[in-house]
């Protein structure tokens, strides 16, 4: 996680809470996922998990970032493999 007070540059779009453009590196997505998971723990510790709207939104964003992170990792692995061994044909 980044040091306290350091924010990642993440723009939001009206149609989604997490605008993954397909270009964000997996490292940045993992940082954001860590932030969201830490936020969820903090919310639960302070008894704020009863706010259903907030928790639903948080869980949705965690799911979106998890999907984006997984996709980014697979893409980065495939790209690295292609660079080392060559593209697979067939």
Image (cartoon, rainbow, N blue to C red):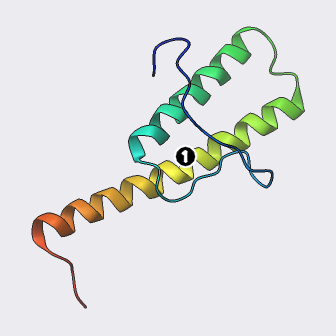
Q: Residue at x 47, y 50 (%)?
A: 24
Q: Is residue 29 above or below residue 34?
A: below
Q: Secondary structure at mark 1?
A: helix
**Which quadrant would the N terminus be assigned to in this image?**
top left
Q: Where residue 79 appears, x then y in whole percent?
A: 27, 64
Report the residue marked by disc 1: 66
Q: Residue at x 80, y 51 (%)?
A: 14
Q: Residue at x 52, y 11 (%)?
A: 4
Report which quarter residue 35 is drawn in: top right
| Side (left or right) of 11 relative to 34 | right
Residue extending farthest bottom: 90
Q: Where residue 55 appears, x then y in whole percent?
A: 79, 31
Q: Residue at x 53, y 52 (%)?
A: 68
Q: Nearer the viewer, residue 34 or 19?
A: 19
Q: Is residue 60 above or below residue 44?
A: below
Residue extending farthest top: 46
Q: Residues within 10 Å of mark 1 (few under 14, many from 20)?
A: some
Report which quarter residue 81 is drawn in: bottom left
Q: Where residue 45 appears, x then y in whole percent?
A: 70, 10
Q: Nearer the viewer, residue 7 or 80?
A: 7
């Amino acid at each position: 996680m980044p040091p306290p007070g350091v924010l990642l540059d993440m723009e939001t779009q009206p149609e989604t809470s997490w605008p993954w453009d397909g270009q964000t590196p997996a490292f940045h997505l993992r940082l954001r996922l860590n932030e969201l998971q830490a936020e969820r723990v903090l919310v639960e510790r302070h008894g704020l998990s009863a706010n259903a709207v907030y928790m639903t939104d948080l869980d949705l964003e965690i799911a979106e970032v998890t999907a984006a992170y997984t996709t980014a990792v697979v893409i980065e692995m495939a790209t690295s493999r292609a660079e080392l061994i060559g593209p697979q044909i067939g």
